[in-house]
Amino acid sequence: MDLPTLATVLQSALSTNPEERKAGEERLNQYQHVQGHLAGLLQIIVATHIDLSIRQVASIYFKNVIARDWVPREPVVVPKISDTDKALVREHLLEAIVQAPYIIRVQLGECLKTCIHADYPEHWPDLLPAIFNNLKSQDQQRVYGALYALRILTRKYEFKDEEERMPVYHIINTTFPVLLEILNHLLALPNPAIEVADLIKLILKIFWSSAYLEIPKLLHDVNTFTAWMSSFHNLLERPVPVEGQPTNPEQRKVWGWWKVKKWTLHIMNRLYNRFGDPKMSKPENKAFALMFQKNFSGKFLELYMKLLSVVRENGYLPDRVINLALQYLSTSVSKAVTYQLLKPQLDVVLFEIIFPLMCFNDADDVLWREDPHEYVRKGYDIIEDMYSPRTAAINFISELVRKRGKENLQKFLSFIVEVFRRYDEAPADQKPYRQKDGALLAVGALNDKLKLTEPYKSQLEHMLVNHVYPEFRSPAGHLRAKAAWVAGQYADITFSDQRHFTSALHSVVAALTDPELPVRVDSVVSLRTFVEACKDLSEIRPILPQLLDEFFKLMNEVENEDLVFTLETIVDKFGEEMAPYALGLCQNLAAAFWKCLESSETDDDEDDSGALAAVGCLRAIGTILESVSRLPEIYPAIEPTLLPIMQRMLTTDGQDVFEEVLEIVSYMTYFSPVISVNMWSLWPLMVDALLEWAIDYFENLLVPLDNYISRSTEHFLTCTQPDYQTSLFKVISTLMAAEKLEDSDIEPAPKLIEAVLQNCRGRVDQWLEPYLRISIERLRKTRKNYLKDLLVNVIANGLYYNAPMCLTILQHLGVTSEIFQSWFQMLYEVKKSGKPLHFVREHDKKVCILGLASLLVVPTAAMPPELQAGLDQVFKALLKLLVAYKEQRAEAAKVEEVEDDDEEEWDGTADDGEWDKEIDDDEDEGDESTEKLQKLAAQAKAFSHADDSDSDFEDYADDEEFQAPIDNVDAFIFFSDAMKAMSISDPARFQALSGSLDFQQQAWAHGLAQHAEERRKEIEKEAMEKAVAAGAGVALQ
């Protein structure tokens, strides 16, 4: 297609006429992979004589083709984009970026990113020289294009580990000298235009990406690094131009020159945090850290202080700039060099910068009055915290009193007490509400320190009663909200007068009906800590219905996951007492979930509070279902409310909440008296999800699938529309045969086979051969030891299911010798420590025991010859397993007993404060904590390499929640009964096996027989006691 024709087709793709637009799009799609088409698009994109809208649509179409087809998602014989076209794109893409206007450059930047990630440096060695040549140009547009491309190139390596970072060092060595030249040239320009700020910002971003994870060797050179630091010093020191600053607050904070300040602060903070502490540095970076600490950390601290002085003068600084500046000050607190410089200025910092930032301000007041929902959202949004000066101020004061509290805590609290005093003494119409708000915020933020530190610890109740609780009645809404929040921070202290706790609790509950939305939200969140701290639930029980009612009114008004946390706490605390409210709670939460889901789907901005609240609703439903698990009759009433959620969210629509939904399905299928036909409608959804996209959730899916098989076995076996048995085999066989899946991905598959064979024993003969076959095929390819164990367990389960049939199948497949040789090799394989390498869990040992013991009573006619010849080896391996199983059970019982004792003795007085020890003025943080970290790292390393004969983490614990039909089968009694049956049915075999034992093995056999009889008596006694207890229960009724 020639260029004029291509331009015409692109123009038709912009048409307002649907038919004409569709025809244009179809024609474009027909030509998308024709050789030379991409080159033609690039020519259109850079052609200045063509209408900009046509060039823009060409750039978007070009980007989409590159994104979709540059790197094929699946292996293909013939690539959709030919090597010739790729070479043409690589040859001309950088020049197109240089020439393109902004709206087109953004699209081409995405293309460059795709090509760089796929091709650089192996298939695009010419890119760096081309960028370098453009950097040396005197043409500002060409320099900008080169910087734009270099930023994308260095960003590829921003988070790469050392092995993958090698190309970036060549990029740095090539470009950094000329970048520094450009930066210094731009800094020397008088009255620079805003375009200069854009160029500087790109250089800063390139530096950031290049030095994010590691300091390049080039910057270890003192002269080179000093030159860069001098430029950064200049950028921070020079005032931002007044002329040209936008008046709109949103535009002003993202103005180019403020962005330059922000990125410079970013870089300096990163250098100081990650590379500026000799104690925390890698050996090869220690000299650099010493140089930074000695030559630059103090100089930049002075600049930061100068920058923050604008706050004292009520001048303008963007929130993000203030936040970053305070982060540097927080880091400076724990470093002796900078703390000594900061110390003389601390009064100014604390009382003229930090405290004013903590106070309620004009912007807060406007938001509170005009958009209380947004006020609430910002207050609970962790992303907002990253930009908030107030959060940075809180973090600074917290770090200061944590690390340098000896002289600073008393000084700061004296200031806060003075604020309280001035407030109390002021006339009602002149009270400094905003300063009181800041003081309460400070007290609440320092709660961890004050709860542990005398004399403040013993004065907290007095402080709460006199300065916090009265504000529940304040005419200022923000003070009522702050009172609720602070009360919650201290709800867990020990009150000398319990009436104070009760009074505060009632104040918080009363605040749930406050006319101001933020007060109601803060009160609900605060309520959580009161419920957790409440020792006498009778204080809350009478108001529980009212409390839940207000709670759901609020949930209908605002989407906030913290509200759901409070509900979870209430449900968890009251347990089965929530039964009367369970249905209503689930209905309200389901309604809130649908509302939050709709909100998150229709919201175009990046605020994900609706999605987070939706997750919280599902999690709370799970908590409710768990709390009433001993009342199964409640579940059928709840099911109709939850079924639509489960049906919708088990599709791709629910990928973000899949775990939470599966937990609900698990509860519903486990605790309901029966699994309804409606609940069975979820089975196909889960199986389809597993096959199509949900392999990462296989472990989560295992639980409900197992529930269906084990708790609704009859339906699983008899239903043919749909055929659940066939669908299960399809998904298991597909996943077991998938070459791309790792061993760890498919571990639940053999567990599901085990569920079928154990729960449907004697009723799925037709599936035994298929399941054995796919397990053996996968076993041959398996490397992970745990999966090997699980697959061998399928063989053992087959023997337990029907030993003669299983052996016939193994013979038919021609694998009998292969399987038993592998099995016995695994049974005797040990780690370097001497511990078994395989069948580590009790459950695995038991499955093997039941399978091997089942062999003992197989008639000779059904026993393959090779197995008959080695039956004595089977018998000896079985004895060894039984002894190991007995020892493991005894050890587990001891551990459980010790844990119970530990729980009884635990009084909660362990000292967790060691890591928060204060440091002297002339010390750096880290002298002790670094040693501890190093010791822990050494221990972890020793642990991880102690047994490197085993590449897997093999100490898999038995799942205490997991239940299986064989739980009711005692392995020792099963073995004993098999031996007795063999002695009757085949005395010769019994004598031969007994006679093959050495003295040690004979002692094992005798001890196991005795233990079996002891177990038999214990089980009979337990059964009798249960029967008596059940009878007594009936009599009482």
Image (cartoon, rainbow, N blue to C red):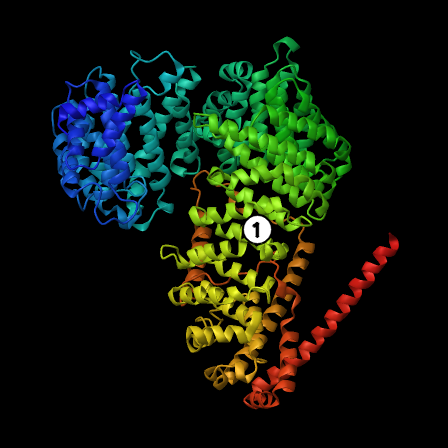
Q: Amino acid at mark 1?
A: Pro
Asked if 847 appears above or below 868 in the picture, the reply is: above
Residue 951 on image: x %, y %: 40, 63
Corner quadrant of residue 1027? bottom right
Q: Is residue 582 left or right of residue 405?
A: right
- The answer to whether residue 493 of the structure is visible from this angle is no
Q: Residue at x 66, y 53 (%)?
A: 906
Q: Is residue 327 left or right of residue 502?
A: left
Say which residue label 1 marks: 704
Q: Is residue 809 left or right of residue 444?
A: left
Asked if 431 appears above or below 776 in the picture, the reply is: above
Local crowd size for mark 1, using a 10 Å CA cut-off: few (<14), some (14–19), many (≥20): many
Taking depth in this image into account, of 306 and 120 the one nearest to the observer is 120
Residue 892 on image: x %, y %: 61, 65
As drawn, the residue found furthest toward the front would be 721
Asked if 947 appears above or below 862 in the picture, the reply is: above
Q: Quadrant of the N terminus?
A: top left
Taking depth in this image into account, of 599 and 201 the one nearest to the observer is 599
Corner quadrant of residue 146? top left
Q: Determine the secondary structure under disc 1.
A: helix
Corner quadrant of residue 536? top right
- The answer to whether residue 802 of the structure is visible from this angle is yes
